[in-house]
Each structure stands twice: as C-alpha cells, then as structure tokens.
Image (tube, grey):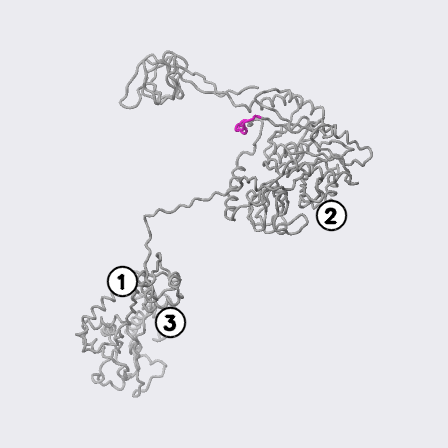
Amino acid sequence: MPVRIYEISKKLGLENKVVLAKAKALDISNARVASSSLDKITAEYLEQQLIAEHPEIAAPEPPPEPTPAPTVHEPIVIVTSPKEPEAAPTAAAEPTSPEATEAATPTTTSEVDATESSTEVTPAAEPAATEAEESVTVQAAEPQEEPIEEEDQPTGPKIGDKVGFIQLSPTPQRLRPQDKARQEAEARRQRAAGAKTQPRTAGRTQPQAKPTAKAEPQFKPPTTGTLIHLKPPVVIRELAEKIGQKPFSVIASLMEMGIFATVNQAIDELAAQKVCAKFGFRFELEKRDRTAKPVIQQKKKVELDFDDKPEDLKPRPPVVTIMGHVDHGKTTLLDVVRQSNVVASEAGGITQHIGAYTISFPHPEDKKRLQQITFLDTPGHAAFSSMRARGADVTDIVVLVVAANDGVMPQTMEALNHAKAANVPILVAVNKCDIPGANPVRVRQQLQEKELTPDDWGGETIFVDCSAVTKQGVDKLLEMILLQADLLELKANPDRRAMGNVIESGLEPGGPTATVLVRKGTLKVTDVILCGHFYGRVRALISEEGKRMKSAGPSHAVKVLGLNGVPEAGLEFIVVENEKAARDLAEKRAQELKADQLEARSRVTLENLFDTLAAQQSKVLKAIVKADTQGSVEAIVSELGKIESEKVALEVVHSAVGTVTESDVLLAAASKAVVLGFHTRVDSGVAETAKHHGVQVKLYAIIYELVDEIKLAMAGLLDPMLKEVVTGSAEIRKIFELSKGVPVAGCMVSSGRIVRGKVRVRRRKEVIYEGITQSLRRFQDEVNEVRAGMECGIRIDGFGDFQEGDLIECYTLEKVAQTL
C-alpha cells in the first residue's frame, strides 16, 4: 500500500520540507512533493533514517486506537483453505527443515496470546515463513521459551509487526493451451513421484492434504452399437444431433470427464468416443481425403431466350399502334375505340399514364366470338423509335390517321417513315369525313405518291373512311384490323417465361414503375424480371383500369412494380430463374454500359462509316434531308438519286421542310443515319440530343458541296484495296555460313532502298520465297535501311537456301481507297 510524504511527516511530527530533504539525501527519486507516494518498504526505510537523525522522536506516541487489555486477549482463530492436490505429494517428498517441520504441525485452531503475537518477526525469519505458507501456520515462538517482558515494554504489537496470515485459494488464471498442457504433464509427473514415496511418508502427518481427485468414469463402447461418422472438427451440437441427445446431456457427460466446453465448441476424438460409448454408440472420425481434387462446379449459363415449338404456339391478340398528326383526330378516335369495348363495365377516356390498353370486339366472321385488340399509344414517337433501334418487333399493325380536310401533313410523313422503318402492315384511317369540304380521294392520291396504293385502286393498303365524332366507320376499322391480324397469323407461347418491351416508365411514390408489353409467355407476380441493367421481383401487376392482376399473357400491357430502377422506354425485359442470376446479369450489363459510355460517342459519322459498318454485308448509306423549301428538298433528293454505284447504295430515310427537330435525331439514331440540313437551322436542345445518341448533323449552304461529301462518304464504305509497292532490290554477291542459324547473304543494293520488313527472293525472275527480314546489318552495326550502291548483310527468317546471283526485293502493302 503506498504511503505519502505528508503522512510520514504527520506521523513523526516533522515538517514536509525536512522529510523531503532527507529523502533527497537518500536518493529517493519518487519523493518530489508532499503528495508524492512511496512504497511501504521505502517509507519504513525513510522513517528509520529520520528517527536515527532525530532522537527526540524515537518513542512516538501510541496510535489513538484503543489497545487491548494487557492480560486478557481474544484467541486468534486461523481457518485454513484446502490445498491444491498437486501440492501435497511435493511437500511430502521434499525433506523439511526443523523449523518447517514444526510449522507443518497440523492445527485446526490456534490460540495465541497477545504476548506471543507481540514478538518481533525478524527479517531472517521471513523466508522461513514464506516457505511454510503451503502448510498455513503462524510464525511464533514457543510460549515456554519466551522471556518475561518488562512491565514498561508495550504489550501491543508494534506497527509493521506480522501477527499471522491466512492463506486463501489463489485466483484462477486463464492459461494458454500450451501452458495448460505443460502444467498437466508436470502434475502427472508429480503424482507419479508421490505414489513412489507414499510408503516412506506413511507415518508422517501430511499438512492439510486434499483427498485424491475423483477418478474419471470409464465408458466402454459397445461392440454392436451404431457407428457414428463425423468430419473434424467435432462440434458438440453436431455430435448431440447424431446420437439423438440434447446438447446439455453431452455437456454434462463431458463435465464428468473434467472437460468444460460450450455447445458450439469442438472436442477431440477421444472425448467424442467416450461420450458416444456412454449412450451406446461407436464413434469413428472421418478422415479428410487430401489427395482428392476439389470439384469445380461449372457455372450454369442463364438462357435468356429460346425458340418455341410449333405445337406450343397459340393465337394472340394483335398489337396496334395509332400514329398521325396531332390535329387529325387521333385522340378522339382512340376515345371512340375505347368506348367500343363490349367487355368493359364502365366507359371512360384513355388512361394516358398507361400508354396501352386492350379491348374486346366481335370478330367480323363470327359475331359471337370476341377478339381482343391491344392498342399502343406512342406520343412523340420516342418510344417507338427506341423499340425499333433495339430491333424489337413490338407493333404488329400501324394505323395511320389522316384528316380528310387537311390531307398529308409533314408530321404524317414522319409517322409514315416510322411505320416503313418498322416494316409492319399499314392501315390508313381517313378521319373527319363528316366535315364539309372533306376530300378522301385527295388523301388517297397523296399517299399513292408515297407508295401506299389503296386496296380499292388495286393496291395492298387498306383505306377506311371514318369519323370519330359521328362514329362512322369505326366498327369497320376494327373489323379490318382483325382481318389483317388473321392474315398475319399472330401466335405466341403462353406457357413459358415472359418476354417483352417497356412502353413507359417513371418514378412514383411507391417506387420505380414500368409499363411493359408482354410478347411471349406469361408474366406473373413474384417473377424475377431483368430489364437492361435493372432487375427486381414483381410485387404487383396493375391493369389499365387500375385493378391488380395475378398474371398477364401475350400482347397484354400491364404496369409492373418491383424494379430497382427506372428503365428506358423500348428496353427489352426477360424473366429469369432466380434473383441471383438477375443480379449477376444486371451488374454485367451495367459494367458494359459504363464501358460504352467511356468510348467515343460518335457512332455514325461521314468520316468513320467504314469503321462502324465494315462488318455488315451490304453497304448502305442512310440520310435524313431537311431544307428550307420544298423545292430545295426535291432538288437535293434528285441529286442524291443520280449518284449511281454498284458497290454502295444510298437511301434517303426521311426528307421534309423545316428545321432539324428532335424527332429527326431520334429517327436517325434508330436508322443509323446522318442528318443533312440545307439552308436551315437546328432547334434548341437538339444538339445535346444528337450528342447523346451519337448522331451527326451536317449543315450546308451549297448543294454541290453536300453531294460531293455524300460521294466521299459512300466511297468510304468500300473496303480499301491492298497494293504492293517495291521499295528496293539487292543482288546476292556472297554467302556467309554461321555456326548456328540461317546463313547471311552478302548483298549489294542495286536500286531503291532495303528496309526491315517484307521481302521476297527471286531466282531467274521467279519468286522462290516470301518472308520478313530477321537481321539487316552494315558492317557490324544493325541498321534500319540501306540505300542503293551500298553493301549489307541480310538474314531472312526461315530461309537459308541462297545462291549467288539471287535478287532480294523489299516491298510494302498500302491501302488504296476505292472509287465509285
């Protein structure tokens, strides 16, 4: 226990500075201030020195505590604790000194008078007391040998005197496994030595010897018991499950054997055998085969799509897209078609947030049979262009709405070009026939010029005169749609994993949503859906009426909840087996998308068309022409049509009057075309859209400059021609043989220059070998070229059959662009 400086000063009646000065003189470094602490031995040493220096304080006053009566004392009872089992044999085996033997006399109760306990314990007696701590004694002198003390001598014990001690059980320490094993081995050796010395020490009284430890129970495994096999490590929980017992029963059995373990800890093989033997089982540890090679599981490839068998295909409803000018009554016609649904329980307008809906209409040949039709609304044609750009044949039939009083408008031609690019049948609905001044014949004439010949004029395009206000011809239009669908023989397999396309998408309070159109299979709730680099489990399917559905078959549009992101319109979706496969594919697609974004945005330009379309078999240059006047448009298209070439074809995807709009850029992105503008401008924000989609927009002021650049671009589509160019020749004058490798031809350059690269060997004007130069030297130096009139040494890789008089020609291959 530490002692402070001011406590020593108070005890001796000295000032703090006197005590500090004496401590400094004695080189006690801890004594710096009055509150400094000293250990007990140092404090006693300092007190002795101070008492020797100041004799007046040699007899300090007794402490204020009341001292016991000089004659009557309470007996001191010393309770001894049981000793460790391994300590008894050791104490019995070693020879003891007389003092230790006397101290080892067994006592249960010791009555020591106060006069005996007042005897001083000298420093020399302290080691003997330390050696006798195992026997738990009180170091004191015999009563009869103690001299009679004088009356003036204080009867109480002095400060610091040792009266006795009580040995308590030592605090168990956590030992490492290797220390524990070493301790157990030492204990076994001590027990063996104690057993040998047992007869010699039989007559002596052992000091507080503990009884021998209880022997571990012996369990013998039955010969016919069930054999238990376990691989290491043997966990108690697994062992209990194997033998059909509760884990606490196994833990209790281990405690009987002196093994303490929890339910999740492992035990050795011997302990497991004993536990199994107790419950009537045999145990055998299953050895691991280290020679066996690890089994490499091949990753199963996720099959996204497959061809359906013809017998599995069943008829499906047609998917119809209505396109046309916004002022030609398209919205009103869609509203009337929506009201023609004989199955719907309520009438209403089109749910624009869905973008698609399905109606049922009587079949024209069988009025009792209801045929379903799915209508797809594509405002602005953005989703339709994205679908066609990704090669998705979503639409089966396109209905082109044209007003009878206005005729063909520029946006009508744009919609017509979209329909032609999709390569689907076109039906023309001539609307507003009830308005005075309507001229359906003029509409037929205008569209006939655009290669849409009416069926009543001997063509293949169906024209239907209708009116959305009076509902004239609406039923006939629906019947024509069903007849056209019968001719197409639309079928799909509903008994497979669903596939389709995203029509619209958005972010709502409930999370990301996507309106999808199922093309194959049946989409169900809880299916795992993959769409681009987004995936998720379908949590709900909502119809166009806002009702929840459990499944959606082919040609049906539903809103899907459950994706982890908002996909783009036009992306294809697929149902996969599990969520892990969907996650892996989504991460892979996300990495590919990020890599594509890091590459050059410019996909189709006039300069790199050869690089982008070299893999295609047919060489076609597609262009979109926009000009300020109709005459300029016709002139440019006429000049482009005059470019004749059997190697490259030129296709004008769309031509119109006006500025370059966003629709033109989207059409160019879908068709992989370039936009050519003549005396026009680009709308605001279109340049960013073109940069995003990688579409090149070129503006011209001179028509011949436009035509010349188109010709150069068409020529750039052609594969270049390879042409050999001879750079020089050399005559072999002498041949030098080497110890290893091909020989060296000593040559004189006769014309041009010889460089490292492709060479051919000619003998009497015939080529006998073609290869590359392995070494080109002049004297001892390696050079890159040798000019005419100079000597050199040439080694050709893989050829050494030189003869004097042979010629070595050096040549290169150059790419020459073809012309139209």
Q: What stretch is highlighted in magenta?
A: 610-619
The residue carrying mark 1 is 182
Q: Where is residue 521 in the image (x, y as percent from the top left)?
A: 58, 44
Q: In this view, does 268 lie above or below 216?
A: above
Mark 3 secondary-structure assignment:
helix
Quarter of the C terminus within the rendering? top right
Identity, as a three-letter code, of the amino acid under mark 1:
Arg
For label 2, the crowd category at 10 Å Cα-Cα, with few meaning under 14, some 14 to 19 and many 20 or more, is few
Q: Which of marks 1 and 3 is in front?
A: 1
Nearer-the-camera pick, 373 or 622: 373
Nearer-the-camera pick, 562 or 445: 445
Identity, as a three-letter code, of the amino acid under mark 2:
Gly
The label shown at residue 348 is 2
| Magenta residues, dominant SS class | loop
In primary-sequence order, the first of circles 1 and 3 is 3
CB under 8 Å between discs 1 and 3: no
Q: Nearer the viewer, mark 2 or mark 3?
A: 2
Between the C-alphas of marks 2 and 3, the distance is 100 Å
For label 3, the crowd category at 10 Å Cα-Cα, with few meaning under 14, some 14 to 19 and many 20 or more, is many
* Location of residue 279 by image quarter: bottom left
In primary-sequence order, the first of circles 1 and 2 is 1
Between the C-alphas of marks 1 and 2, the distance is 91 Å
For label 1, the crowd category at 10 Å Cα-Cα, with few meaning under 14, some 14 to 19 and many 20 or more, is few
In primary-sequence order, the first of circles 2 and 3 is 3
Q: Where is residue 179 in the image (x, y as percent from the top left)?
A: 29, 62
Q: Nearer the viewer, mark 1 or mark 2?
A: 2
Q: Does the magenta stretch include residue 225?
A: no
Q: Is residue 617 magenta?
A: yes
Nearer-the-camera pick, 726 or 415: 415
